[in-house]
Amino acid sequence: SVNPDTLLLAQYRQDQLGPPNPDKYLRYPSLPLYQPGYAMWGLFPNGLIANNIKGENTDNQQDISVALQFGWNQIGPPYTTNLNITTHLFVQYLGSDVVSLPQAVTNGWLAAGVIGFSPTTGYNDITNTTDQSFPLNTLEVWKGYWIRVMVTEGVTLTYVNPNAPTRAARLRSRAAVG
């Protein structure tokens, strides 16, 4: 058990405004159960390391989908493998065809860019960066990112497990047709 006074876990939620959330963040212990594919800020007490955090391994799942809200959303890879945003992330808006993340930007569903944060260099768009601390077009394991939805509710982001090539190939094929 972790003392809430020594741990900070927070997730930005644009639907949370006003007391007790004047800055639109839900904080531990008021957070809902964690769902793979979303991200949160974390500041852990001394002595607590990632190896001590227990949870269900999602590496055996072919894909994981998360609902995104209008505006900014915190996302993160749900697997223990880095993900390429052009080949492992797919988007669907309402009942439309599934498309690649770059196509979702072209369609106007998402704003251009996926934003990462580094304590040394600040915020960077991982789709267009020369900052060596951010591999181009890559969601790194144990890191969170920002993505901005430009349309009303109904956007679903799907992460395809890079270790399940048959599912990824099928989604890529569907996205190429759409």
Image (cartoon, rainbow, N blue to C red):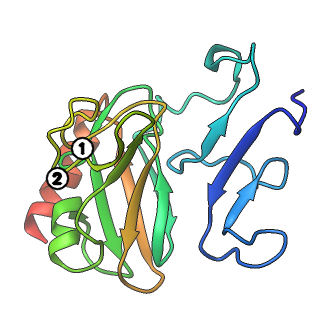
- Eyeballing the image, is 160 above or below 165? below
Q: Which mark is residue 172?
A: 2
> Within the image, what quadrant is residue 31 found in?
bottom right
From the viewer's perspective, tell me whether residue 86 is left or right of residue 2: left
Q: Residue at x 23, y 80 (%)?
A: 108
Q: Residue at x 74, y 41 (%)?
A: 8
Residue 107's x, y, as percent? 18, 79
- Eyeballing the image, is 118 above or below 28? above
Q: Amino acid at mark 1?
A: Ala
Front residue (pair 141, 20) = 20
What is the CA distance from the residue labelled 2 to the residue labelled 1? Answer: 6 Å
Q: Which mark is residue 168?
A: 1
Residue 6's x, y, as percent? 84, 32
Q: Amino acid at mark 2?
A: Arg
Front residue (pair 106, 90) = 106
Q: Residue at x 83, y 75 (%)?
A: 19
Which part of the image, by quadrant, shows the N terminus?
top right
Residue 100's x, y, as percent? 20, 60
Q: Residue furthest front?
A: 120
Residue 36's x, y, as percent? 55, 44
Determine crowd level at label 1: few under 14, some 14-19, many 20+ residues with C-alpha closer than 10 A. Answer: many
From the viewer's perspective, tell me whether residue 30 is left or right of residue 115: right
- Eyeballing the image, is 30 above or below 139? below
> Within the image, what quadrant is residue 3 found in?
top right
- Tell me whether circle 2 and circle 1 mark residues in contact (CB < 8 Å): yes
- Looking at the rendered structure, the secondary structure element under dot 2 is helix
Front residue (pair 156, 77) = 77
